[in-house]
Image (cartoon, rainbow, N blue to C red):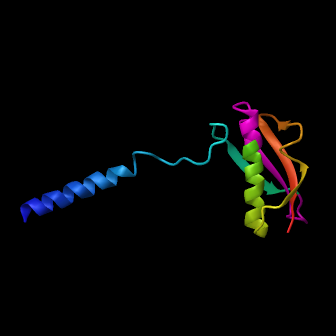
Amino acid sequence: MRGAIILLLTAAVATSACSRLKKDDGVRFDGQKFRIKATKASRDDRSMFVSTAAPASNSIEGAREAAAYGGTRYCIEQYGTSLIAWAHGPEAEPLFDGDRLVLEGQCKW
């Protein structure tokens, strides 16, 4: 009986430490983490949005992908679709606001 209790306690301690071995710290783009923010661009029309990713100085290509990801998530959360008509999209020449890469688009449903 005592052996079973010790075995059970050992297993509980061992498995509780497993969650600390590898922490999932979010999505990475081009191997980098970015602060992604997507907000409505207009008070009257929430389908229009601006998506930013920072710091763009880490990787312009990664920031471009991260901002596009932010726009896609915004449209899915607001309208349930990932269809976007880009006004200034990920394929265009990069637009910056300081160290933030900026994309603009409209969710289509």
Q: How many marks?
A: 0
Is 48 in front, or is 65?
A: 65
Residue 59 placement, left or right of 45: left
Is 105 in front, or is 30?
A: 30
Residue 27: x, y in percent? 61, 47
Task: Please state, as top left, top right, bottom left or bottom right, where the N terminus lies in the image.
Answer: bottom left
Q: Which residues are magenta?
A: 42-64
**Residue at left offset 69%, top offset 31%:** 58
Residue 92 placement, left or right of 56: right
Task: Please state, as top left, top right, bottom left or bottom right, where the C terminus lies in the image.
Answer: bottom right
| Residue 94 colored in magenta in the image | no
Residue 79: x, y in percent? 79, 69
**Residue at left offset 19%, top offset 61%:** 8
- 47 to 14, vertically: above or below: below
Residue 87 placement, left or right of 29: right
**Residue at left offset 87%, top offset 64%:** 108
The image quadrant that residue 97 belongs to is top right
- 97 to 18, vertically: above or below: above
**Residue at left offset 77%, top offset 38%:** 100
Residue 88: x, y in percent? 90, 46
The image quadrant that residue 53 belongs to is top right
Residue 61: x, y in percent? 75, 36
Residue 44 placement, left or right of 69: right
Work out which residue is located at the far left of the displayed protein and give it.
Answer: 1
